[in-house]
Image: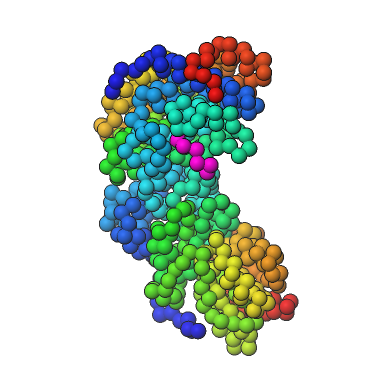
Amino acid sequence: MSQPDYEKLQKLATQIRRDIVRMVHGAASGHPGGSLGCTEYFVALYFHILDRKDTFNMDGKGEDIFFLSNGHISPVWYATLARAGYFEVSELATFRKLNTRLQGHPATEEGLPGIRVASGSLGQGLSVAVGASRAKKLNQDDHLVYVLMGDGEQQEGQVWEAAMFAAHNKVDNLIATIDYNGQQIDGPVDEVMSLGDLRAKWQAFGWEVLESNGNDLKDLIDTLEKAKSMTGQGKPVLNLMRTDMGYGVDFMVGTHKWHGIAPNDEELEKALSQLEETLGDY
Amino acid sequence: MTKFTFSEKKDTRSGFGEGLLEAGRKNPNVVGLCADLTGSLKMGDFQGEFPERFFQTGIAEANMMGLAAGMTVGGKIPFTGTFANFSTGRVYDQIRQSIAYSEKNVKVCASHAGLTLGEDGATHQILEDIGMMKMLPNFTVVVPCDFNQTRLATMAIAEHEGPVYLRFGRPKWPIFTDPNDSFEIGKAHKLIDGNDVTIFATGHMVWLAIEAEAILAEKGISAEVINIHTIKPLDIKAILESTRKTGAVVVAEEHQRFGGLGESIATELAVHSPTPMEFVAVNDHFGESGKPEELLSKYGLSKEAIVEKCEMVIQRK
Protein backbone atom coordinates (compact mmCIF):
# COMPACT_ATOMS: atom_id res chain seq x y z
CA MET A 1 0.00 0.00 0.00
CA SER A 2 1.29 3.45 -0.96
CA GLN A 3 1.87 6.13 1.65
CA PRO A 4 -1.19 8.25 2.32
CA ASP A 5 -1.15 11.71 0.73
CA TYR A 6 -2.44 13.55 3.76
CA GLU A 7 -2.63 16.91 2.02
CA LYS A 8 -4.89 15.47 -0.65
CA LEU A 9 -6.98 13.58 1.89
CA GLN A 10 -7.41 16.69 4.04
CA LYS A 11 -8.58 18.69 1.02
CA LEU A 12 -11.12 16.00 0.25
CA ALA A 13 -12.36 15.99 3.84
CA THR A 14 -12.82 19.76 3.87
CA GLN A 15 -14.64 19.77 0.55
CA ILE A 16 -16.87 16.87 1.58
CA ARG A 17 -17.78 18.75 4.76
CA ARG A 18 -18.84 21.69 2.59
CA ASP A 19 -20.87 19.30 0.47
CA ILE A 20 -22.57 17.88 3.57
CA VAL A 21 -23.73 21.18 5.01
CA ARG A 22 -24.81 22.44 1.60
CA MET A 23 -26.77 19.24 0.87
CA VAL A 24 -28.55 19.28 4.20
CA HIS A 25 -29.28 22.99 3.85
CA GLY A 26 -30.56 22.47 0.31
CA ALA A 27 -32.92 19.72 1.43
CA ALA A 28 -33.83 21.61 4.62
CA SER A 29 -33.51 18.23 6.35
CA GLY A 30 -30.97 15.50 7.01
CA HIS A 31 -28.35 14.54 9.56
CA PRO A 32 -25.28 16.79 9.48
CA GLY A 33 -23.79 15.94 12.90
CA GLY A 34 -22.82 12.30 12.35
CA SER A 35 -21.91 13.00 8.74
CA LEU A 36 -19.39 15.67 9.71
CA GLY A 37 -18.00 13.50 12.50
CA CYS A 38 -17.34 10.58 10.13
CA THR A 39 -15.87 12.52 7.22
CA GLU A 40 -12.27 11.43 7.86
CA TYR A 41 -13.42 7.80 8.02
CA PHE A 42 -15.10 7.98 4.60
CA VAL A 43 -12.17 9.82 3.06
CA ALA A 44 -9.66 7.35 4.52
CA LEU A 45 -11.77 4.40 3.38
CA TYR A 46 -12.53 5.41 -0.20
CA PHE A 47 -9.31 7.26 -1.00
CA HIS A 48 -6.75 5.06 0.72
CA ILE A 49 -7.92 1.90 2.47
CA LEU A 50 -10.35 0.16 0.11
CA ASP A 51 -9.01 -1.95 -2.74
CA ARG A 52 -11.94 -1.01 -4.97
CA LYS A 53 -12.90 -0.88 -8.60
CA ASP A 54 -13.59 2.46 -10.28
CA THR A 55 -16.98 1.38 -11.55
CA PHE A 56 -19.72 -0.03 -9.40
CA ASN A 57 -20.69 -3.70 -9.48
CA MET A 58 -23.45 -4.87 -7.19
CA ASP A 59 -21.81 -8.25 -6.54
CA GLY A 60 -18.57 -6.64 -5.35
CA LYS A 61 -16.52 -9.64 -6.45
CA GLY A 62 -12.76 -9.12 -6.49
CA GLU A 63 -12.84 -5.88 -4.49
CA ASP A 64 -13.26 -4.63 -0.93
CA ILE A 65 -16.83 -3.59 -0.19
CA PHE A 66 -18.43 -1.26 2.35
CA PHE A 67 -21.82 -1.20 4.06
CA LEU A 68 -23.25 1.73 6.02
CA SER A 69 -25.49 0.52 8.83
CA ASN A 70 -26.36 3.91 10.34
CA GLY A 71 -27.89 5.06 7.08
CA HIS A 72 -28.94 8.47 8.36
CA ILE A 73 -25.43 9.78 7.76
CA SER A 74 -26.08 9.36 4.03
CA PRO A 75 -24.81 12.90 3.20
CA VAL A 76 -21.19 12.00 3.92
CA TRP A 77 -21.48 8.74 1.98
CA TYR A 78 -23.11 10.35 -1.05
CA ALA A 79 -20.59 13.19 -1.11
CA THR A 80 -17.72 10.70 -0.82
CA LEU A 81 -19.11 8.46 -3.58
CA ALA A 82 -19.50 11.46 -5.87
CA ARG A 83 -16.02 12.78 -5.11
CA ALA A 84 -14.68 9.26 -5.74
CA GLY A 85 -16.22 9.36 -9.21
CA TYR A 86 -19.13 6.92 -8.88
CA PHE A 87 -21.52 9.63 -10.11
CA GLU A 88 -21.45 13.34 -10.96
CA VAL A 89 -21.01 15.73 -8.03
CA SER A 90 -23.80 17.87 -9.48
CA GLU A 91 -26.23 15.14 -8.47
CA LEU A 92 -25.56 15.98 -4.80
CA ALA A 93 -27.93 18.92 -5.30
CA THR A 94 -30.84 16.48 -5.60
CA PHE A 95 -30.38 15.04 -2.09
CA ARG A 96 -33.76 14.21 -0.50
CA LYS A 97 -35.72 15.79 -3.36
CA LEU A 98 -38.51 14.13 -5.35
CA ASN A 99 -37.29 11.57 -7.93
CA THR A 100 -33.74 11.64 -6.59
CA ARG A 101 -31.38 8.68 -6.44
CA LEU A 102 -30.04 10.24 -3.23
CA GLN A 103 -32.82 9.14 -0.90
CA GLY A 104 -32.93 10.41 2.68
CA HIS A 105 -31.56 7.04 3.70
CA PRO A 106 -29.48 4.92 1.30
CA ALA A 107 -31.45 2.69 -1.05
CA THR A 108 -30.85 0.43 -4.04
CA GLU A 109 -34.16 0.91 -5.84
CA GLU A 110 -33.08 4.00 -7.78
CA GLY A 111 -29.79 2.37 -8.74
CA LEU A 112 -27.34 4.80 -7.14
CA PRO A 113 -23.82 3.43 -7.75
CA GLY A 114 -22.11 2.50 -4.49
CA ILE A 115 -25.15 1.33 -2.53
CA ARG A 116 -25.64 -2.43 -2.10
CA VAL A 117 -28.37 -2.56 0.53
CA ALA A 118 -30.86 -0.13 2.02
CA SER A 119 -30.18 1.10 5.55
CA GLY A 120 -31.73 3.49 7.99
CA SER A 121 -33.72 1.21 10.23
CA LEU A 122 -30.87 0.59 12.64
CA GLY A 123 -29.11 -2.57 13.71
CA GLN A 124 -29.15 -4.44 10.40
CA GLY A 125 -25.89 -3.51 8.67
CA LEU A 126 -23.54 -5.73 10.65
CA SER A 127 -25.63 -8.80 9.81
CA VAL A 128 -25.57 -7.87 6.14
CA ALA A 129 -21.81 -7.30 6.23
CA VAL A 130 -21.20 -10.63 7.96
CA GLY A 131 -23.34 -12.34 5.29
CA ALA A 132 -21.34 -10.65 2.53
CA SER A 133 -18.12 -11.74 4.27
CA ARG A 134 -19.33 -15.35 4.25
CA ALA A 135 -20.19 -15.09 0.57
CA LYS A 136 -16.66 -13.82 -0.16
CA LYS A 137 -15.23 -16.88 1.61
CA LEU A 138 -17.45 -19.21 -0.41
CA ASN A 139 -16.35 -17.42 -3.58
CA GLN A 140 -12.69 -17.71 -2.52
CA ASP A 141 -12.48 -13.95 -2.85
CA ASP A 142 -9.85 -12.74 -0.39
CA HIS A 143 -11.01 -9.13 -0.35
CA LEU A 144 -12.42 -7.53 2.79
CA VAL A 145 -15.79 -6.28 3.94
CA TYR A 146 -16.11 -3.03 5.91
CA VAL A 147 -19.11 -1.78 7.85
CA LEU A 148 -19.82 1.36 9.86
CA MET A 149 -22.32 1.48 12.73
CA GLY A 150 -23.40 4.18 15.13
CA ASP A 151 -22.86 4.05 18.88
CA GLY A 152 -26.51 4.63 19.72
CA GLU A 153 -27.16 1.76 17.31
CA GLN A 154 -25.41 -0.56 19.75
CA GLN A 155 -28.68 -0.48 21.69
CA GLU A 156 -30.26 -2.66 18.98
CA GLY A 157 -30.23 -6.35 19.90
CA GLN A 158 -29.56 -7.52 16.35
CA VAL A 159 -26.07 -6.01 16.51
CA TRP A 160 -25.19 -8.51 19.23
CA GLU A 161 -26.76 -11.41 17.37
CA ALA A 162 -24.46 -10.59 14.48
CA ALA A 163 -21.46 -10.08 16.78
CA MET A 164 -22.00 -13.54 18.26
CA PHE A 165 -22.36 -15.19 14.85
CA ALA A 166 -19.20 -13.53 13.50
CA ALA A 167 -17.03 -14.67 16.39
CA HIS A 168 -18.49 -18.19 16.48
CA ASN A 169 -17.91 -18.61 12.75
CA LYS A 170 -14.45 -17.00 12.78
CA VAL A 171 -15.45 -14.34 10.28
CA ASP A 172 -11.99 -12.83 9.81
CA ASN A 173 -12.42 -10.95 6.53
CA LEU A 174 -14.48 -8.19 8.14
CA ILE A 175 -13.54 -4.86 9.71
CA ALA A 176 -16.39 -3.20 11.58
CA THR A 177 -16.22 0.35 12.89
CA ILE A 178 -18.35 2.06 15.50
CA ASP A 179 -18.72 5.83 15.32
CA TYR A 180 -18.26 6.43 19.04
CA ASN A 181 -19.33 10.06 19.31
CA GLY A 182 -21.35 9.64 22.48
CA GLN A 183 -24.45 11.33 21.09
CA GLN A 184 -27.84 10.12 19.88
CA ILE A 185 -31.01 11.96 18.91
CA ASP A 186 -32.46 12.36 22.40
CA GLY A 187 -29.17 13.33 24.04
CA PRO A 188 -25.85 11.93 25.24
CA VAL A 189 -25.73 8.14 24.91
CA ASP A 190 -24.79 7.86 28.58
CA GLU A 191 -28.05 9.56 29.53
CA VAL A 192 -30.33 7.84 27.01
CA MET A 193 -29.06 4.27 27.48
CA SER A 194 -25.49 3.85 28.56
CA LEU A 195 -23.39 1.31 26.67
CA GLY A 196 -21.08 0.48 29.56
CA ASP A 197 -17.60 -0.65 28.63
CA LEU A 198 -18.06 -1.08 24.89
CA ARG A 199 -14.52 -2.32 24.33
CA ALA A 200 -14.90 -5.00 26.98
CA LYS A 201 -18.30 -6.02 25.63
CA TRP A 202 -16.98 -6.59 22.10
CA GLN A 203 -13.93 -8.39 23.42
CA ALA A 204 -16.18 -10.59 25.53
CA PHE A 205 -18.10 -11.41 22.35
CA GLY A 206 -14.84 -12.68 20.84
CA TRP A 207 -13.73 -9.74 18.70
CA GLU A 208 -10.35 -8.06 18.35
CA VAL A 209 -10.89 -4.42 19.33
CA LEU A 210 -8.78 -1.44 18.25
CA GLU A 211 -9.37 2.16 19.24
CA SER A 212 -8.82 5.18 17.05
CA ASN A 213 -9.31 8.92 16.87
CA GLY A 214 -11.69 9.20 13.95
CA ASN A 215 -11.06 12.89 13.37
CA ASP A 216 -7.29 12.41 13.04
CA LEU A 217 -6.57 11.07 9.55
CA LYS A 218 -3.17 9.68 10.45
CA ASP A 219 -4.32 7.89 13.57
CA LEU A 220 -7.37 6.56 11.77
CA ILE A 221 -5.43 5.27 8.75
CA ASP A 222 -2.78 3.71 10.99
CA THR A 223 -5.54 1.95 12.93
CA LEU A 224 -7.34 0.72 9.82
CA GLU A 225 -4.02 -0.55 8.40
CA LYS A 226 -3.43 -2.39 11.65
CA ALA A 227 -6.96 -3.80 11.47
CA LYS A 228 -6.20 -5.09 7.96
CA SER A 229 -3.07 -6.78 9.25
CA MET A 230 -5.21 -8.58 11.84
CA THR A 231 -7.62 -10.09 9.32
CA GLY A 232 -7.28 -13.72 8.30
CA GLN A 233 -6.48 -14.83 11.83
CA GLY A 234 -9.75 -16.38 12.89
CA LYS A 235 -11.32 -13.36 14.57
CA PRO A 236 -13.50 -10.44 13.47
CA VAL A 237 -12.00 -6.99 14.02
CA LEU A 238 -13.67 -3.90 15.46
CA ASN A 239 -12.40 -0.33 15.21
CA LEU A 240 -13.86 1.64 18.10
CA MET A 241 -13.60 5.08 16.57
CA ARG A 242 -13.88 8.15 18.78
CA THR A 243 -15.26 11.12 16.91
CA ASP A 244 -16.80 14.48 17.66
CA MET A 245 -20.28 14.78 16.22
CA GLY A 246 -20.37 17.86 14.01
CA TYR A 247 -16.54 18.05 13.72
CA GLY A 248 -15.34 20.87 11.47
CA VAL A 249 -18.15 23.33 12.16
CA ASP A 250 -17.60 24.93 15.56
CA PHE A 251 -21.22 25.50 16.52
CA MET A 252 -22.22 21.95 15.56
CA VAL A 253 -19.46 20.16 17.50
CA GLY A 254 -20.10 17.77 20.32
CA THR A 255 -23.85 18.18 20.67
CA HIS A 256 -26.81 16.00 19.77
CA LYS A 257 -28.70 19.16 18.73
CA TRP A 258 -27.28 18.88 15.20
CA HIS A 259 -28.01 15.16 14.90
CA GLY A 260 -30.97 15.58 12.62
CA ILE A 261 -31.63 19.21 11.72
CA ALA A 262 -30.57 21.42 8.84
CA PRO A 263 -28.80 24.78 9.06
CA ASN A 264 -30.71 27.89 7.96
CA ASP A 265 -29.21 30.38 5.47
CA GLU A 266 -27.27 32.27 8.11
CA GLU A 267 -25.97 29.13 9.77
CA LEU A 268 -24.94 27.76 6.38
CA GLU A 269 -22.83 30.86 5.69
CA LYS A 270 -21.26 30.61 9.11
CA ALA A 271 -20.45 26.93 8.57
CA LEU A 272 -19.02 27.46 5.08
CA SER A 273 -16.80 30.29 6.34
CA GLN A 274 -15.01 27.65 8.41
CA LEU A 275 -14.58 25.20 5.51
CA GLU A 276 -12.39 26.21 2.61
CA GLU A 277 -13.63 25.34 -0.88
CA THR A 278 -10.73 23.09 -1.89
CA LEU A 279 -12.02 21.11 -4.87
CA GLY A 280 -14.89 23.22 -6.18
CA ASP A 281 -18.47 23.11 -4.91
CA TYR A 282 -21.06 21.08 -6.81
CA MET B 1 -60.72 -34.46 -15.18
CA THR B 2 -58.76 -36.70 -12.85
CA LYS B 3 -60.45 -37.71 -9.65
CA PHE B 4 -58.06 -36.98 -6.84
CA THR B 5 -57.17 -39.70 -4.37
CA PHE B 6 -54.22 -40.35 -2.16
CA SER B 7 -52.41 -43.39 -0.89
CA GLU B 8 -49.85 -41.65 1.27
CA LYS B 9 -49.60 -38.74 3.64
CA LYS B 10 -46.44 -36.70 4.11
CA ASP B 11 -45.64 -33.31 5.59
CA THR B 12 -45.09 -30.42 3.19
CA ARG B 13 -41.94 -29.44 5.10
CA SER B 14 -40.37 -32.71 3.94
CA GLY B 15 -41.16 -31.64 0.39
CA PHE B 16 -39.22 -28.47 1.13
CA GLY B 17 -36.28 -30.50 2.47
CA GLU B 18 -36.12 -32.63 -0.68
CA GLY B 19 -36.58 -29.65 -2.97
CA LEU B 20 -33.81 -27.73 -1.24
CA LEU B 21 -31.42 -30.66 -1.59
CA GLU B 22 -32.19 -30.94 -5.30
CA ALA B 23 -31.90 -27.18 -5.82
CA GLY B 24 -28.55 -27.32 -4.00
CA ARG B 25 -27.30 -30.07 -6.28
CA LYS B 26 -28.36 -28.16 -9.34
CA ASN B 27 -26.97 -24.77 -8.40
CA PRO B 28 -23.82 -24.31 -6.30
CA ASN B 29 -24.93 -20.79 -5.34
CA VAL B 30 -27.86 -22.13 -3.28
CA VAL B 31 -27.07 -21.79 0.43
CA GLY B 32 -29.17 -22.68 3.48
CA LEU B 33 -29.56 -20.82 6.77
CA CYS B 34 -31.46 -22.09 9.77
CA ALA B 35 -32.20 -20.67 13.23
CA ASP B 36 -31.92 -23.79 15.41
CA LEU B 37 -34.75 -25.72 13.72
CA THR B 38 -32.82 -27.80 11.20
CA GLY B 39 -34.71 -30.99 12.05
CA SER B 40 -38.14 -29.35 12.04
CA LEU B 41 -37.44 -27.68 8.70
CA LYS B 42 -36.01 -30.90 7.22
CA MET B 43 -32.82 -29.11 6.20
CA GLY B 44 -30.58 -31.86 7.57
CA ASP B 45 -29.97 -33.57 4.22
CA PHE B 46 -28.86 -30.28 2.66
CA GLN B 47 -26.62 -29.62 5.65
CA GLY B 48 -25.14 -33.11 5.40
CA GLU B 49 -24.38 -32.90 1.69
CA PHE B 50 -23.27 -29.25 1.63
CA PRO B 51 -21.86 -28.46 5.08
CA GLU B 52 -19.89 -25.46 3.79
CA ARG B 53 -23.07 -23.99 2.27
CA PHE B 54 -25.20 -24.40 5.37
CA PHE B 55 -25.22 -21.76 8.12
CA GLN B 56 -26.53 -22.45 11.61
CA THR B 57 -27.47 -19.02 12.97
CA GLY B 58 -28.63 -20.01 16.43
CA ILE B 59 -31.85 -18.56 17.80
CA ALA B 60 -31.32 -15.22 16.12
CA GLU B 61 -33.77 -14.78 13.28
CA ALA B 62 -33.16 -11.05 12.74
CA ASN B 63 -29.48 -11.72 12.14
CA MET B 64 -30.37 -14.63 9.85
CA MET B 65 -32.34 -12.30 7.54
CA GLY B 66 -29.49 -9.80 7.43
CA LEU B 67 -26.93 -12.54 6.74
CA ALA B 68 -29.08 -13.81 3.88
CA ALA B 69 -29.36 -10.32 2.39
CA GLY B 70 -25.58 -9.89 2.61
CA MET B 71 -24.90 -13.25 0.97
CA THR B 72 -26.86 -12.25 -2.13
CA VAL B 73 -24.30 -9.50 -2.67
CA GLY B 74 -21.77 -12.21 -3.49
CA GLY B 75 -24.25 -13.93 -5.83
CA LYS B 76 -25.55 -16.52 -3.39
CA ILE B 77 -29.19 -17.69 -3.33
CA PRO B 78 -29.99 -18.00 0.38
CA PHE B 79 -32.88 -20.12 1.67
CA THR B 80 -33.70 -19.19 5.27
CA GLY B 81 -35.56 -21.73 7.36
CA THR B 82 -37.55 -21.35 10.54
CA PHE B 83 -41.18 -21.48 11.66
CA ALA B 84 -43.55 -19.15 9.81
CA ASN B 85 -44.07 -17.03 12.89
CA PHE B 86 -40.34 -16.37 13.26
CA SER B 87 -39.91 -16.01 9.49
CA THR B 88 -42.27 -13.06 9.22
CA GLY B 89 -43.69 -11.14 12.18
CA ARG B 90 -40.57 -11.48 14.27
CA VAL B 91 -38.32 -10.16 11.50
CA TYR B 92 -40.65 -8.03 9.43
CA ASP B 93 -38.51 -4.91 9.48
CA GLN B 94 -35.35 -6.84 8.60
CA ILE B 95 -37.14 -8.42 5.65
CA ARG B 96 -38.70 -5.13 4.62
CA GLN B 97 -35.50 -3.08 4.56
CA SER B 98 -32.63 -5.50 3.92
CA ILE B 99 -34.47 -7.88 1.56
CA ALA B 100 -37.66 -6.45 -0.01
CA TYR B 101 -36.69 -2.79 -0.45
CA SER B 102 -33.11 -3.81 -1.23
CA GLU B 103 -34.37 -6.23 -3.93
CA LYS B 104 -32.38 -9.16 -2.60
CA ASN B 105 -32.68 -12.68 -3.97
CA VAL B 106 -33.57 -14.32 -0.64
CA LYS B 107 -36.02 -17.21 -0.24
CA VAL B 108 -37.79 -16.95 3.11
CA CYS B 109 -38.96 -20.52 3.76
CA ALA B 110 -41.47 -20.95 6.54
CA SER B 111 -42.75 -24.11 8.14
CA HIS B 112 -45.40 -24.79 10.79
CA ALA B 113 -47.73 -22.15 9.39
CA GLY B 114 -51.33 -21.94 10.50
CA LEU B 115 -53.57 -23.90 12.86
CA THR B 116 -52.27 -27.31 11.75
CA LEU B 117 -49.13 -26.72 13.79
CA GLY B 118 -51.41 -28.08 16.49
CA GLU B 119 -50.54 -28.58 20.13
CA ASP B 120 -47.93 -25.79 20.46
CA GLY B 121 -50.79 -23.31 20.40
CA ALA B 122 -51.37 -19.74 19.31
CA THR B 123 -47.89 -18.34 20.05
CA HIS B 124 -46.62 -20.42 17.13
CA GLN B 125 -49.72 -20.70 14.93
CA ILE B 126 -49.23 -17.68 12.75
CA LEU B 127 -52.32 -16.79 10.72
CA GLU B 128 -51.21 -13.34 9.56
CA ASP B 129 -48.08 -14.16 7.57
CA ILE B 130 -49.59 -14.23 4.08
CA GLY B 131 -50.99 -10.76 4.66
CA MET B 132 -47.70 -9.36 5.89
CA MET B 133 -45.67 -10.85 3.09
CA LYS B 134 -48.04 -10.06 0.22
CA MET B 135 -48.04 -6.41 1.27
CA LEU B 136 -44.30 -6.08 0.70
CA PRO B 137 -43.42 -4.66 -2.73
CA ASN B 138 -41.05 -6.90 -4.75
CA PHE B 139 -42.12 -10.06 -2.86
CA THR B 140 -43.54 -13.22 -4.39
CA VAL B 141 -45.69 -15.37 -2.08
CA VAL B 142 -46.03 -19.12 -2.71
CA VAL B 143 -48.18 -21.54 -0.69
CA PRO B 144 -48.01 -25.10 -2.07
CA CYS B 145 -50.67 -27.70 -1.24
CA ASP B 146 -48.89 -31.01 -0.63
CA PHE B 147 -45.53 -32.73 -0.39
CA ASN B 148 -44.99 -33.06 -4.14
CA GLN B 149 -45.94 -29.50 -4.89
CA THR B 150 -43.79 -28.12 -2.07
CA ARG B 151 -40.80 -29.96 -3.51
CA LEU B 152 -41.49 -28.54 -6.99
CA ALA B 153 -42.12 -25.05 -5.62
CA THR B 154 -38.84 -25.09 -3.71
CA MET B 155 -36.93 -25.92 -6.87
CA ALA B 156 -38.88 -23.32 -8.84
CA ILE B 157 -38.16 -20.45 -6.47
CA ALA B 158 -34.43 -21.22 -6.68
CA GLU B 159 -34.66 -20.40 -10.39
CA HIS B 160 -36.72 -17.26 -9.81
CA GLU B 161 -34.79 -13.99 -9.40
CA GLY B 162 -36.14 -11.94 -6.48
CA PRO B 163 -37.36 -12.33 -2.91
CA VAL B 164 -39.88 -15.11 -2.25
CA TYR B 165 -41.93 -16.19 0.75
CA LEU B 166 -42.58 -19.95 0.69
CA ARG B 167 -45.14 -21.14 3.23
CA PHE B 168 -45.65 -24.77 4.26
CA GLY B 169 -46.61 -26.81 7.30
CA ARG B 170 -46.08 -29.44 9.88
CA PRO B 171 -48.73 -32.19 9.65
CA LYS B 172 -48.72 -35.27 7.49
CA TRP B 173 -51.17 -34.41 4.72
CA PRO B 174 -52.55 -36.30 1.72
CA ILE B 175 -50.29 -36.36 -1.34
CA PHE B 176 -52.61 -35.98 -4.30
CA THR B 177 -50.64 -34.06 -6.94
CA ASP B 178 -48.36 -35.68 -9.48
CA PRO B 179 -44.64 -35.51 -8.66
CA ASN B 180 -44.03 -34.74 -12.35
CA ASP B 181 -46.49 -31.84 -12.55
CA SER B 182 -45.22 -28.61 -13.93
CA PHE B 183 -44.91 -25.79 -11.44
CA GLU B 184 -44.97 -22.26 -12.69
CA ILE B 185 -44.94 -19.38 -10.19
CA GLY B 186 -48.09 -17.30 -10.64
CA LYS B 187 -50.00 -19.92 -12.65
CA ALA B 188 -53.08 -21.36 -10.90
CA HIS B 189 -53.89 -25.08 -11.19
CA LYS B 190 -57.44 -26.01 -12.03
CA LEU B 191 -58.02 -29.35 -10.35
CA ILE B 192 -61.74 -30.00 -10.90
CA ASP B 193 -64.09 -28.52 -13.51
CA GLY B 194 -67.47 -27.26 -12.32
CA ASN B 195 -70.26 -24.83 -13.17
CA ASP B 196 -72.14 -23.72 -10.05
CA VAL B 197 -69.44 -22.34 -7.77
CA THR B 198 -65.66 -21.91 -7.76
CA ILE B 199 -63.61 -22.90 -4.73
CA PHE B 200 -60.26 -21.14 -4.71
CA ALA B 201 -58.05 -22.81 -2.13
CA THR B 202 -54.44 -22.61 -1.05
CA GLY B 203 -52.08 -24.76 1.04
CA HIS B 204 -53.55 -27.55 3.16
CA MET B 205 -57.06 -26.34 2.35
CA VAL B 206 -56.77 -27.53 -1.26
CA TRP B 207 -57.24 -31.15 -0.18
CA LEU B 208 -60.27 -30.19 1.92
CA ALA B 209 -61.70 -28.36 -1.09
CA ILE B 210 -61.35 -31.57 -3.13
CA GLU B 211 -63.19 -33.49 -0.40
CA ALA B 212 -65.86 -30.79 -0.24
CA GLU B 213 -66.37 -31.03 -4.01
CA ALA B 214 -67.23 -34.71 -3.69
CA ILE B 215 -69.86 -33.97 -1.04
CA LEU B 216 -71.27 -31.13 -3.16
CA ALA B 217 -71.42 -33.44 -6.21
CA GLU B 218 -73.57 -35.89 -4.26
CA LYS B 219 -75.91 -33.00 -3.53
CA GLY B 220 -76.07 -32.18 -7.22
CA ILE B 221 -73.87 -29.08 -6.99
CA SER B 222 -71.06 -28.76 -9.51
CA ALA B 223 -68.05 -27.08 -7.93
CA GLU B 224 -64.88 -26.01 -9.69
CA VAL B 225 -61.73 -26.36 -7.58
CA ILE B 226 -58.70 -24.22 -8.31
CA ASN B 227 -55.41 -24.42 -6.44
CA ILE B 228 -53.96 -20.94 -5.98
CA HIS B 229 -50.42 -21.89 -5.00
CA THR B 230 -49.13 -18.40 -5.75
CA ILE B 231 -50.80 -15.69 -3.69
CA LYS B 232 -48.68 -13.02 -5.32
CA PRO B 233 -48.56 -12.44 -8.22
CA LEU B 234 -52.14 -13.63 -8.40
CA ASP B 235 -53.34 -15.46 -11.52
CA ILE B 236 -56.07 -12.92 -12.23
CA LYS B 237 -56.83 -14.38 -15.66
CA ALA B 238 -57.61 -17.83 -14.26
CA ILE B 239 -59.64 -16.34 -11.41
CA LEU B 240 -61.78 -14.16 -13.70
CA GLU B 241 -62.30 -16.94 -16.21
CA SER B 242 -63.66 -19.34 -13.61
CA THR B 243 -65.62 -16.71 -11.71
CA ARG B 244 -67.39 -15.50 -14.86
CA LYS B 245 -68.35 -19.08 -15.61
CA THR B 246 -69.69 -20.08 -12.16
CA GLY B 247 -70.82 -16.70 -10.78
CA ALA B 248 -70.09 -17.64 -7.17
CA VAL B 249 -66.84 -17.87 -5.21
CA VAL B 250 -65.63 -19.48 -2.00
CA VAL B 251 -62.04 -18.96 -0.88
CA ALA B 252 -60.48 -21.44 1.57
CA GLU B 253 -57.24 -20.77 3.40
CA GLU B 254 -55.54 -21.56 6.69
CA HIS B 255 -55.05 -17.88 7.54
CA GLN B 256 -56.89 -14.87 8.88
CA ARG B 257 -59.68 -13.67 6.63
CA PHE B 258 -58.18 -10.19 6.90
CA GLY B 259 -55.11 -10.04 4.73
CA GLY B 260 -55.39 -13.46 3.16
CA LEU B 261 -55.96 -14.93 -0.28
CA GLY B 262 -59.68 -14.21 0.01
CA GLU B 263 -58.98 -10.53 0.40
CA SER B 264 -56.69 -10.53 -2.64
CA ILE B 265 -59.32 -12.23 -4.79
CA ALA B 266 -62.10 -9.99 -3.47
CA THR B 267 -60.10 -6.91 -4.41
CA GLU B 268 -59.63 -8.13 -7.98
CA LEU B 269 -63.26 -9.18 -8.34
CA ALA B 270 -64.51 -5.88 -6.91
CA VAL B 271 -62.67 -4.10 -9.70
CA HIS B 272 -63.14 -6.48 -12.62
CA SER B 273 -66.17 -8.63 -11.95
CA PRO B 274 -68.15 -8.18 -8.71
CA THR B 275 -69.32 -11.64 -7.64
CA PRO B 276 -70.93 -13.11 -4.49
CA MET B 277 -68.17 -14.48 -2.26
CA GLU B 278 -67.81 -16.42 0.96
CA PHE B 279 -64.69 -17.02 3.01
CA VAL B 280 -63.42 -20.11 4.76
CA ALA B 281 -60.73 -18.62 6.98
CA VAL B 282 -60.04 -17.73 10.59
CA ASN B 283 -62.16 -14.77 11.52
CA ASP B 284 -60.09 -12.35 13.62
CA HIS B 285 -59.08 -14.88 16.27
CA PHE B 286 -55.89 -16.42 17.61
CA GLY B 287 -55.66 -20.22 17.57
CA GLU B 288 -55.07 -22.53 20.54
CA SER B 289 -53.70 -25.94 21.47
CA GLY B 290 -55.29 -29.05 19.99
CA LYS B 291 -55.00 -31.59 17.20
CA PRO B 292 -54.86 -30.16 13.68
CA GLU B 293 -58.23 -31.63 12.64
CA GLU B 294 -59.89 -30.45 15.86
CA LEU B 295 -58.57 -26.94 15.34
CA LEU B 296 -59.58 -26.77 11.69
CA SER B 297 -63.06 -27.87 12.69
CA LYS B 298 -63.38 -25.48 15.64
CA TYR B 299 -62.27 -22.46 13.61
CA GLY B 300 -64.49 -23.25 10.63
CA LEU B 301 -61.87 -24.58 8.24
CA SER B 302 -63.31 -28.07 7.62
CA LYS B 303 -64.60 -29.62 4.40
CA GLU B 304 -68.11 -29.31 5.91
CA ALA B 305 -67.55 -25.58 6.32
CA ILE B 306 -66.53 -25.33 2.66
CA VAL B 307 -69.68 -27.19 1.63
CA GLU B 308 -71.84 -24.90 3.76
CA LYS B 309 -70.25 -21.74 2.35
CA CYS B 310 -70.69 -23.03 -1.21
CA GLU B 311 -74.40 -23.58 -0.60
CA MET B 312 -74.71 -20.13 0.96
CA VAL B 313 -72.94 -18.32 -1.86
CA ILE B 314 -74.99 -20.08 -4.54
CA GLN B 315 -78.13 -18.75 -2.82
CA ARG B 316 -76.78 -15.23 -3.28
CA LYS B 317 -76.35 -15.47 -7.04
Q: Nearer the viewer, residue B134 or B39?
A: B134
Quadrant position of residue A198 = top left
- x, y percent for residue B21: 33, 60
Q: Is residue B205 visible?
A: no
Q: How is the image coloured?
A: rainbow
Residue B118 placement (x, y as % from top left): 50, 63
* Residue B187 rendering spot, x and y as whole percentages: 51, 68
Left or right: where B312 falls relative to A222: right
Q: Residue at x 34, y 43 (%)?
A: A135
Q: Quadrant of the C terminus of chain B?
A: bottom right
Q: Which one is in front, B84 or A77? A: A77
Viewer-side residue, A80 vs B196:
A80
Residue A56 seen anywhere in this rendered image of the structure:
yes
Residue B40: which quarter of the image?
bottom left
Residue B24: within the magenta? no
Q: Which residues are magenta?
A: A108-114
Q: Main secondary structure of the magenta part?
A: loop
**Residue found at x 60% / y 25%:** A24
- Magenta stretch contains residue A112: yes
Snapshot quadrant of residue A178: top left
> Relative to residue A30, is residue B316 drawn left or right?
right
Please give the name of the residue rendered at 62% of the width and 62% of the height, measured from the top-left corner: B264
Can you say whether B271 is above or below B48 in the image?
Answer: below
Picture layout, residue A98 above or below residue A214? below
Relative height, residue A161 to residue B266 (above, below): above
Residue for point 59% across, 22% down: A22
Q: Is residue B87 above or below residue A192?
A: below
- A191 relative position to A9: left or right: right
Residue A113 x %, y %: 46, 37
